[in-house]
Image: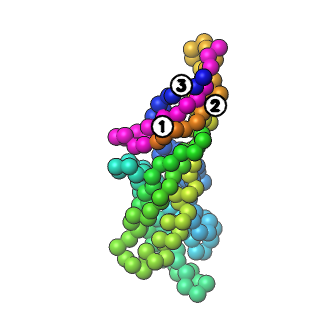
Amino acid sequence: MSRGVELTVSRDALERTLKQQLFSGPDGRYYLKGNAHSACFISTENPQLRFEQDRIVVHVKTRARLGVGGACLGVTVTLPAEVSMEPDAEGETIGFRDAQLDKVSDRKEINFVLAPFLRGQVPKSMKVNAADLLRAALVGSTATSGYKVSLGRLKILSIEIVGDKLVVEADGDISVE
């Protein structure tokens, strides 16, 4: 028999997960085009996450060294960018849908180059398996409580933003030994 459970994920926890999954390279950047050794590249860094109504907004610093006709210009452009998305869930996984590029720059020529990369790549890259997070958190339960607590099955039923938390309603099986 399954009973519903409500799991809340803080904004800080979701931001840490974003940094671990996308910004985990040695320079703390996520490359949308090229890499740290490329003459031309587009990268983002310093993600800051906030909740705004029913959307998750990720503010990043975008760096680009752009090219014309296969040659890169020596000047690196650094601009703030914002991508927003709605939380979505499937099975055990929390992901995103309806990704939108909300802001890159006030300069149209920069938007023309950067917008397709940001719109297409940043939001699709991050998914969080809620069951794996819970299982990892429960691993040390025996040492701290004397009981072995484990999660068997988890199915996410709904997800919504409430204040500064992501609230996940789920069915699942937890056992205590």
- Tell me the number on the disc at residue 3: 3
First in sequence: mark 1 or mark 3?
A: 3
Q: Could you tell me the amino acid type at mark 3?
A: Arg
**Residue 64 in picture, x, y percent from top left:** 50, 71
Q: Point out the frontmost of discs 3 and 2.
A: 3
**Residue 95 in picture, x, y percent from top left:** 54, 49
First in sequence: mark 1 or mark 2?
A: 2
Give the crowd class for mark 1: few <14, some 14-19, many >=20 residues within 10 Å.
Answer: many
Helix, strand or loop under label 3: strand
Q: Give the alpha-carbon distance from disc 3 to disc 2, as whole Å.
A: 11 Å
Q: Could you tell me the amino acid type at mark 2?
A: Arg
Q: Is residue 110 left or right of residue 67?
A: left
Please provide the residue range marked out in magenta. Answer: 160-177
Helix, strand or loop under label 1: strand
The residue under label 2 is 153
**Residue 36 in picture, x, y percent from top left:** 60, 64
Q: Is residue 12 above or below residue 152?
A: below
Helix, strand or loop under label 2: strand
Q: How is the image coloured?
A: rainbow
Q: Point out the frontmost of discs 1 and 3.
A: 3
Can I make out residue 81 in this image?
A: no
Give the crowd class for mark 3: few <14, some 14-19, many >=20 residues within 10 Å.
Answer: few
Q: Could you tell me the amino acid type at mark 1?
A: Val
Can I make out residue 130 in this image?
A: yes
Q: Is residue 6 above or below residue 37?
A: above
Q: Give the alpha-carbon distance from disc 1 to disc 3, as whole Å.
A: 14 Å
The residue under label 1 is 168
Q: Residue at x 44, y 37 (%)?
A: 167
First in sequence: mark 3 or mark 2?
A: 3
Front position in the image: 48 or 78: 48
Labels 3 & 2 near each other (Cβ < 8 A): no
